[in-house]
Image: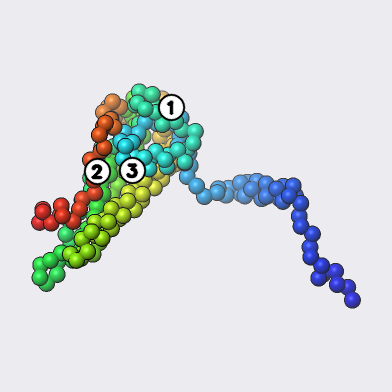
């Protein structure tokens, strides 16, 4: 009886495996397949007006560097080919439901973030845009400290969601097309033009973006 089929197969050599892997990548590329990831930004330098001494500002910069390592984040707007201007960043916390005794049962947390992306001359690459995030949270007066911790955690999760959405917007195909047209001197006469110097500078003190607390909401209502 031939027992050759029971013998363990020979391991492929590493060079052969590497060659096979490269061939697969080339084949997939030829078929139009792209590995999952974010497209790099269409400019070499970028100024971000979101204060870098906040977690949100730090997360935005970290995400930009990870997605587009060849894009240098500048210290001033004058050095940059493109400018990401923050126009609003507001957090809110409001009561959305009361029990039969008139006590709060549920709160709604919110973040409203507005921005625009312009070139060095103020031409809009992305005109004024607003991103929002909402999260509802049950409330229990017997666990105040735990709820404060939960609020901070929920705001961090909402904030990270906004960072991801912002990055997807910055790397969208229409943004790349608009940036390329402006580089070639082709501008839309109907597109808004903004002041490239109207950029919020990072303050020397920590940016006042403390998460609203349950106590804040109770004082308002």
- Quarter of the figure that contains the N terminus: bottom right
Q: Nearer the viewer, residue 201 or 151?
A: 151
**Distance between mark 1 and mark 2 Cα atoms:** 36 Å
Q: What secondary structure is marked by label 2?
A: loop
Question: Considering the numbered disc 3 on the image, is that residue within a helix, a strand or a loop?
Answer: helix
Compared to residue 61, the image places residue 79 above or below, namely: above
**For mark 2, does the 10 Å Cα neighbourhood hold few (<14), some (14 to 19), or many (20 or more) residues?**
few
Quarter of the image where the C terminus is located: bottom left
Residue under label 3 = 55
In the image, which is nearer the foreground, mark 3 or mark 1?
Answer: 3
Label disc, if present, on residue 209 of the rendered structure: 2
Q: Label 1 belongs to which residue?
A: 183
Q: Position of residue 195 (x, y in %)?
A: 27, 27
Who's the residue at 36% across and 51% down the image?
161
Residue 126, percent across and down? 34, 37
Which residue of the protein is positioned furthest toward the right in this rendering?
1
Judge the density around disc 3: few (<14), some (14-19), many (≥20) Cα neighbours within 10 Å: some
**Residue 36, visible in the rendered structure:** yes
Residue in the picture at 26% in, 32% down: 203
Q: Is 185 located above or below residue 100 in the figure?
A: above
């Amino acid at each position: 009886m031939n027992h050759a089929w029971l013998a363990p197969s020979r391991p492929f050599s590493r060079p052969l495996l590497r060659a096979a892997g490269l061939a697969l990548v080339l084949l997939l590329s030829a078929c139009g397949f792209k590995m999952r990831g974010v497209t790099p930004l269409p400019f070499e330098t970028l100024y971000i007006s979101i204060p870098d001494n906040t977690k949100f500002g730090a997360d935005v910069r970290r995400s930009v560097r990870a997605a587009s390592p060849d894009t240098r984040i500048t210290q001033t707007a004058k050095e940059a080919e493109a400018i990401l201007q923050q126009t609003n960043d507001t957090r809110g916390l409001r009561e959305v439901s009361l029990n039969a005794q008139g006590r709060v049962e549920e709160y709604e947390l919110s973040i409203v973030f507005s921005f625009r992306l312009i070139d060095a001359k103020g031409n809009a690459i992305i005109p004024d845009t607003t991103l929002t995030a909402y999260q509802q949270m049950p409330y229990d007066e017997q666990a105040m400290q735990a709820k404060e911790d939960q609020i901070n955690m929920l705001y961090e999760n909402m904030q990270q969601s906004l960072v991801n959405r912002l990055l997807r917007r910055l790397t969208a195909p229409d943004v790349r097309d608009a940036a390329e047209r402006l580089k070639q001197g082709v501008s839309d006469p109907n597109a808004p033009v903004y002041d490239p110097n109207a950029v919020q500078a990072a303050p020397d003190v920590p940016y006042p973006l403390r998460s609203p607390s349950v106590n804040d909401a109770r004082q308002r209502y």
